[in-house]
Amino acid sequence: MARLVSFGPEFEDWLEEVRQMMLREVDYRLEARTTEKFRQMLADDPRFVVPRVLTEYSTDHVIGATYEHGHSVSSEVVANLPLERRNGLGKAALELFFSELFVWGEIQTDPNFGNYRIRIAGETDGKHGEGVEHDRIVLLDFGAVQSYSKEFLDPVIQMIRGSYENDLDAVIDGGIKLRFMSTDWPKEVLETFGQVCMSVLEPLSSDHKSWPKEAINSQGQYRWKQSDLPSRVARQAARSAISRYFRVPPREFVFLNRKLIGVYTFIAVLYSEFNGEPLLRKHLYGDGDDTPDASATNQITNA
């Protein structure tokens, strides 16, 4: 990044956000409250486990919490789960991200695999000797939770919706509002940058025609690992001229992008194979009968 941008105010803002994030990471009282908040928000979702904070053992320097067992995401026992169950875990991770983004406006922005464990259905829960009914994701470490304002999230969601509807102008407009695109860029550069942003949402698209053959299985489901999406997007950006115009994204966007990459990587490591489009559509438009069909929307925006 240092080779691409000048060390101006935007870069200083980004460094300041990193500093603030590090301070939040060691504010254990704040992390305890955030952990409990997420535990309450996910209390009725059997796919997730959040430790219960033990306030009587917590101080400014230590968080006491219940022990929640599980396996590493990349462990052999998780890799050997049937595809349907690995898909379930991948969908749960993606839906959790959508809830954070679209509903709560609070996102755990540190997707380090050490912050997740997988509890396998049928294994004893370690407390009562009873087997759990569902495969579950154990969520750990809430020190990096970011709260996002409506002013920031609205253009982010505009870009996501624009990508889903194949509306390049809406994607570009959202990028300009977020200040990592500029109206004084050449039109070709703006369009290329917008197309790169749209490519990032490939697994969430209903337009399968652009998917490479290796990214789709015989049932038409997206193969997250085999798609090699991050490398393809990086090559697409490198082949264009956008690096000459690159500017440091707003500090909020840097950590949001970090989380998105982490979610994609989590699903890829599970070798999940499913289309994310129905999950995204539900959050964009709800579950009603008036929910637009993506293919129809694409035809309208392409007309």
Image (cartoon, helix red, strand yellow):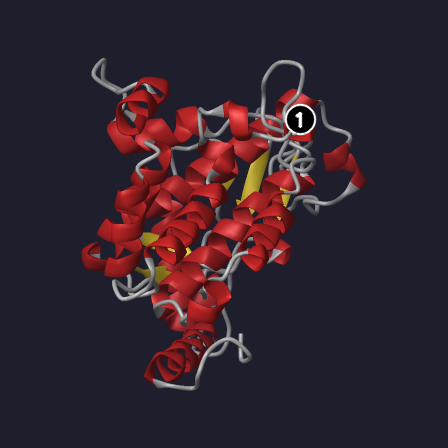
- Please determine whether, in this image, residue 186 is positioned above or below residue 279: below
Location of residue 160 in the rendering, given as x and y in whole percent from the top left corner:
34, 42
Query: In screen coordinates, is 191 left or right of 71?
Result: left
- Asked whether residue 139 is in view, the answer is no
Mark 1 burial class by Cα count in 10 Å: few <14, some 14-19, many 20+: few
Residue at figure coordinates x 64%, y 46% from the top left: 69
Q: Position of residue 271 (x, y in %)?
A: 68, 34
Q: Measuring 48% from the left and 50% from the top, which residue is drawn there?
A: 260
- The residue at the point 33 percent across, 62 percent down is 181
Q: Is residue 270 above or below residue 220?
A: below
Could you say where residue 199 lies in the image, as x and y percent from the top left?
48, 42
Instruction: Give the camera-side residue of 132 and 295.
Output: 295
Left or right of 50 on screen, residue 288: left
> 274 left or right of 291?
right
Q: Quadrant of the C terminus?
A: top left
* Residue at the outermost right position: 76
Tell me how many marks there are. 1
- Badge 1 marks a residue whose secondary structure is helix
Q: Percent from the top left, x then y, of residue 283?
A: 31, 33
Relative side of 274 to 260, left or right = right
> Closest to the observer: 293 or 101?
293
Residue type pointed to by label 1: Lys
User: 279 or 49: nearer the eye?
Assistant: 279
Residue under label 1, please give it.
213
Residue 257 vs residue 263, the one in the foreground = 257
Q: Quadrant of residue 277?
A: top left
Residue 171 visible at all: yes
Question: Which residue is drawn at the image coordinates 47% and 49% (left, top)?
Answer: 196
